[in-house]
Image (cartoon, grey):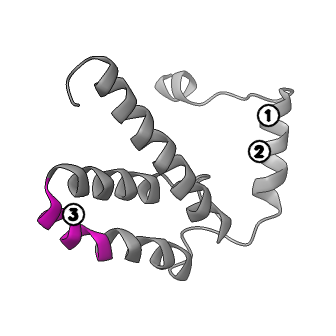
Amino acid sequence: MLQSAFFHSDAGFLFTKINQMIQNHRAVSGAAFPSSYVAGALVWMLSTLRWEKKLGYLMLPIAAGIIPASVYLGLHDAINPLFGIIWGFVCYFTGVAILKKRGEIS
């Protein structure tokens, strides 16, 4: 009963079909696009570089290491972390713009 609440078929929708086509023709199974933990690590690193420089420099090799590690360990295709980087920059700068507009940072 609960399973039907969480799992449903989206058959017939354009983006579902495109996603299924990509998922069926890739080298790594179970990978997410874009890499959310690459994006998250980038946002985390950029935030610490902005507000706590010393901690940011400590986080730099950790965040940078997540990118090749995710591909090497087979968690992602090579394109997923690249788009994760793009998504991370978009999220970071969007967040900074919102905070500036609200007057919370200068």
> Neighbour class for label 3 at 10 Å: few (<14), some, many (≥20)?
some
Secondary structure beneath label 1: helix
Note whether 21 is above or below 96 in the view shown: below
Residue 72 is a magenta residue = no
Name the amino acid type tagged 3.
Gly
Please state if 26 lies on the left or on the right of 70 as rendered: right
Name the amino acid type tagged 2.
Asn
**Badge number at residue 15:** 1
How far apart are the two marked residues, 1 and 3, measured between alpha carbons? 38 Å
| Residue drawn at the location 17% of the way across and 49% of the way down | 51
Q: Earlier in the sequence, mark 2 or mark 3?
A: 2
Name the amino acid type tagged 1.
Phe
How far apart are the two marked residues, 1 and 2, measured between alpha carbons? 6 Å
Secondary structure beneath label 2: helix
- The reply to whether the C-beta atoms of the residues labelled 1 and 3 are less than 8 Å apart is no
Quarter of the rendering occupied by the C terminus: top left
Per the image, the residue denoted by label 3 is 56
